[in-house]
Image (cartoon, grey):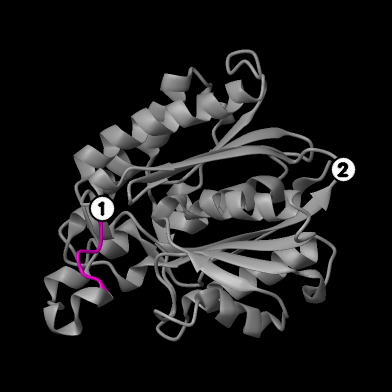
């Protein structure tokens, strides 16, 4: 039996840091309001000449190095992003070129659930024996699609990239990945404009990220707790008697706390990076996971649930032995 296992992680955050105090100078907000409502203290913002592929390739190279393999060993690249360099070619192909890899490469778009969706794809490729080493990248430059005059959205997001190498193993690493979607709620968060609508239809207001915050919050808490419990129970684990870590999509601290409360999980078992990174969409789970592994908070062999919820609506959860 072939399994897939995470063999290396990597992360990259742009050098520029935008604090809540900095935001006070450009939008009607204040540090206390942002901290209390979101838990965010700061976010990283990419430089003007720094593209999504730049962030992704740097995180990817670190993951490859940490996995103890070479770029030549990578047999597939899957990039999860909502903020690609171009409409096409894919950001994955651009990253492939920057790394010097020679393998198939493609993007997927599932918003904040993108990394879990990519993990599902990569896991199936490995289990099927099609690839032995797959590079998964979550990379975002949300600063490019934010309306910096809208305090309800611009305070929430940041730029960054996280990556993992998934390799074939005789022992279970990724135990299962469940993903889902409900397009009936497509208007709750996203960008109103798209290429097929025609460039003539593009207006100033339609090009910015938009979100109905209260409705998204309700759907997120309900869905994230349910999918996390489901993936544990499907694999024969009692959620209330099993020692595991929760590595959630870093939307905001209220969602993280509410999800843990619904799961009856101690807050100390929830990995939190939203305070320093803000919401980095598809990059948030690999960034949080890499940070927890690097600091030793999570150790090799630990059990973890990865979960996400995003525009689409989309969602997903994975149970992994790290």
Residue 256 occupies quadrant: top left
Q: Position of residue 81 (x, y in %)?
A: 46, 65
Residue 200 visible? The answer is yes
Q: Is residue 244 above or below residue 42?
A: above
Q: Is residue 137 above or below residue 97?
A: above
Image position of 115 (left or right of 195): right
Q: Residue 26 magenta-drawn?
A: no
Q: Position of residue 5 (x, y in %)?
A: 76, 47
Q: Is residue 92 above or below residue 79?
A: below
Residue 6 visible? The answer is no
Binning the other alpha carbons within 10 Å of mark 2 as few (below 14), some (14 to 19) or many (20 upward) gives few
Callout 2 secondary element: loop
Q: Position of residue 99 (x, y in %)?
A: 68, 80
Which residue was labeled with disc 2? 170
What segment carries the magenta color?
190-194
Q: Residue 193 magenta-drawn?
A: yes
Q: Which of these two is toward me, 138 or 202?
A: 202
Which residue was labeled with disc 1? 189
Quarter that holds the N terminus: top right
Residue 207 occupies quadrant: bottom left
* Residue ID at (29%, 56%): 155
* Residue ID at (58%, 79%): 93
Contact (Cβ within 8 Å) of mark 1 with mark 2: no
Q: Earlier in the sequence, mark 1 or mark 2?
A: 2
Binning the other alpha carbons within 10 Å of mark 1 as few (below 14), some (14 to 19) or many (20 upward) gives some
């Amino acid at each position: 039996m072939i399994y897939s296992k995470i063999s290396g992680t990597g992360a990259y955050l742009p050098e520029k840091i935008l604090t809540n105090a900095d935001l006070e100078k450009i939008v009607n907000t204040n540090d206390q309001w942002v901290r209390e409502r979101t838990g965010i203290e700061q976010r990283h913002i990419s430089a003007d000449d720094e593209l999504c592929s730049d962030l992704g390739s740097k995180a990817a190279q670190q993951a490859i190095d940490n996995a103890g393999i070479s770029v030549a060993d990578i047999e597939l690249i899957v990039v999860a992003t909502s903020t690609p360099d171009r409409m096409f070619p894919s950001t994955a192909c651009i990253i492939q070129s920057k790394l010097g890899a020679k393998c198939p490469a493609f993007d997927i778009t599932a918003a904040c659930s993108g990394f879990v969706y990519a993990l599902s794809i990569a896991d199936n490729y490995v289990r099927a024996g099609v690839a032995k080493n797959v590079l998964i990248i979550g990379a975002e430059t949300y600063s490019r699609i934010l309306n910096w005059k809208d305090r309800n959205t611009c305070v929430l997001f940041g730029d960054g990239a996280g990556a993992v190498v998934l390799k074939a193993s005789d022992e279970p690493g990724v135990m299962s990945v469940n993903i889902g979607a409900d397009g009936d709620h497509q208007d709750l968060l996203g960008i109103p404009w798209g290429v097929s609508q025609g460039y003539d239809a593009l207006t100033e207001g339609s090009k910015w990220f938009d979100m109905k915050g209260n409705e998204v919050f309700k759907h997120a808490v309900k869905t994230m707790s349910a999918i996390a419990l489901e993936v544990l129970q499907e694999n024969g684990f009692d959620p209330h008697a099993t020692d595991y870590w929760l590595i959630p999509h870093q939307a905001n601290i209220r969602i993280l706390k509410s999800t843990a409360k619904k799961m009856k999980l101690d807050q100390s078992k929830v990995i939190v990076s939203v305070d320093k990174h803000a919401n980095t969409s598809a990059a948030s789970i690999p960034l949080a996971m890499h940070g927890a592994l690097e600091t030793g908070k999570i150790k090799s062999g630990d059990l973890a649930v990865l979960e996400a919820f995003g525009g689409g609506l989309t969602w997903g959860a994975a149970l992994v032995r790290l």
